[in-house]
Image (cartoon, helix red, strand yellow):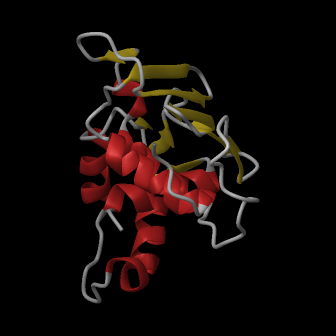
């Protein structure tokens, strides 16, 4: 686990926290989470990490919080390839739930949805920040005419803003890892 992921977990649990509180929490977690037994995290190190990542964290005097425009509430992802299926995932971060919907238009559709091992919304959320959805372009397109490509859309609603991206046969560089994380969450391969 990366240090900033541990800070995010602490802030998600507490809402806001002072640098000394974050330090204490992380020092308690060090043997379990970071596999170092002699590492002691100092407040100055935490402050350096936070000031170096102002895209996600807000530092107000000694109090740290997650930027409201980066704190996820809901994520909706739609993926459709020719001839199908259409897959939809809706993740509610406040309720810690997700729904997965698959729609087939052809007669080769698989049988009923299998039950299986599903991932954790909390685990998915840890990785969500690394995909930087807020930096994705609004529209990804390839050159030329596409008649049977993969189309997709992503909408991330945060406390202050909604980020939307879509594309046809063109994807952001984080796309493969993003789909892999969704696949792990829903327990089914999420790709066309």
Q: Is residue 67 left or right of residue 72?
A: left
Front-most of residues 53 and 188: 188
Outermost residue, bottom side: 37
Q: Residue 150, position in %: x, y? A: 43, 30
Asked if one can make out residue 111 in the rendered structure from this viewpoint, the answer is yes
Outermost residue, top side: 144
Q: Residue at x 41, y 32 (%)?
A: 133
Q: Is residue 38 left or right of residue 182?
A: left
Q: Quadrant of the N terminus?
A: bottom left
Asked if one can make out residue 19 in the rendered structure from this viewpoint, the answer is no
Q: Residue at x 25, y 87 (%)?
A: 38
Image vertical order of residue 41 relative to residue 55, above or below: below
Q: Residue 96, position in %: x, y? A: 71, 53
Q: Residue 67, position in %: x, y? A: 48, 33
> How many numbered marks appear?
0
Q: Is residue 98 left or right of residue 126?
A: right
Front-most of residues 86 and 176: 86
Image vertical order of residue 132 relative to residue 111, above or below: above
Q: Quadrant of the C terminus?
A: top left
Q: Is residue 4 left or right of residue 101?
A: left
Front-most of residues 62 and 106: 106
Front-most of residues 176 and 41: 176
Q: Residue at x 50, y 41 (%)?
A: 65
Image vertical order of residue 48 relative to residue 90, above or below: below
Q: Residue 5, position in %: x, y? A: 41, 57
Q: Residue at x 53, y 32 (%)?
A: 80
């Amino acid at each position: 686990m990366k240090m900033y992921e541990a800070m995010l977990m602490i802030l998600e649990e507490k809402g806001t926290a002072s640098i000394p509180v974050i330090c204490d929490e992380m020092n308690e977690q060090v043997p379990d989470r970071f596999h170092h037994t002699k590492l002691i995290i100092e407040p100055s190190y935490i402050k350096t990490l936070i000031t170096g990542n102002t895209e996600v964290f807000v530092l107000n005097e000694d109090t740290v919080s997650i930027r409201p425009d980066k704190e996820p509430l809901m994520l909706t992802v739609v993926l459709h390839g020719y001839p199908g299926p259409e897959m939809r995932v809706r993740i509610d971060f406040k309720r810690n739930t997700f729904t997965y919907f698959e729609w087939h238009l052809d007669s080769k559709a698989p049988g009923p949805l299998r039950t299986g091992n599903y991932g954790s919304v909390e685990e998915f959320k840890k990785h969500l920040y690394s995909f930087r959805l807020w930096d994705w372009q609004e529209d990804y397109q390839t050159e030329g005419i596409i008649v049977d490509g993969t189309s997709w859309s992503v909408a991330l609603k945060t406390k202050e803003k909604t980020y939307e991206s879509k594309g046809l046969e063109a994807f952001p560089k984080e796309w493969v890892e993003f789909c892999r994380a969704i696949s792990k969450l829903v327990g089914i391969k999420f790709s066309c």
